[in-house]
Structure formats: C-alpha cells, structure tokens
Amino acid sequence: MPTVKEHVRNLLDNLPDNISWKQLRHELWVMEQIEQANAEIARGETIPHEQVMKEVDEWFAKLNRRRTQKRISKKLARAS
C-alpha cells in the first residue's frame, strides 16, 4: 500500500502547475477523506444502503409532519 508521501507525490504530479494554495488544500482534504472512508470500509464500518434509505425516509416523514403541524397551528391561530 502506498505511503501518504507517495500519495501526495502522485497527486502533485497530476495537478496543474498553476494550482493555488487553496485548491491544493482542498485536493489534500479530499484525498484524506477518501483514505479515511477506505479505511472504514476495510474495517467493515459501513451502513447498508437499504438502512440509509430507510433512515432518510424516516427523517423526511418526520420533517413533513412538523411542517404540517406548523401549518395547522398557523391556520388555527388565524381562525381564533
């Protein structure tokens, strides 16, 4: 497995010569995030897609209930 130094060398070799410091920091951050994700995957620390979709659906349902309750509360307040 390549070392961090080797990864950075490879990254630098493939970046344009006129890259800004800000862009370079972003590229390094992205590289680090990918490495962390790969390590989590290797350790089996992932969540199945189906579970993620279920949690997202539950979150949206809860959000929609809150919005509906707020609309009802506003209508009741105006009717009073």
Image (cartoon, rainbow, N blue to C red):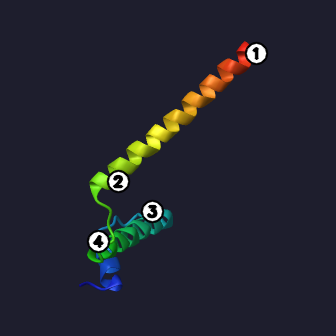
In primary-sequence order, the first of circles 4 and 1 is 4
Identify which amino acid the numbered label 4 is placed on. Ile
SS of the residue under disc 4: helix
Q: Residues within 10 Å of mark 3 (few under 14, many from 20)?
A: few
In primary-sequence order, the first of circles 1 and 3 is 3
Identify which amino acid the numbered label 1 is placed on. Ser
Task: Read off the residue under disc 4.
Answer: 41
SS of the residue under disc 1: loop
Q: Which numbered dot is residue 52?
A: 2
Per the model, the C-alpha gap separating discs 4 and 1 is: 56 Å
The answer to whether the residue labelled 4 contacts the one labelled 2, judged by CB atoms less than 8 Å apart, is no
Would you place residue 65 above or below residue 52 in this image? Answer: above
The answer to whether the residue labelled 4 contacts the one labelled 3, judged by CB atoms less than 8 Å apart, is no
Q: Which numbered dot is residue 80?
A: 1
Would you place residue 69 above or below residue 23 in this image? Answer: above
Q: Which numbered dot is residue 23?
A: 3
The answer to whether the residue labelled 4 contacts the one labelled 1, judged by CB atoms less than 8 Å apart, is no
Q: Nearer the viewer, mark 1 or mark 2?
A: 1
Q: Residue drawn 27% across and 76% down?
A: 42
In the image, taking residue 67 as reference, residue 23 lies left or right, namely: left
Closest to the observer, 18 or 27? 27
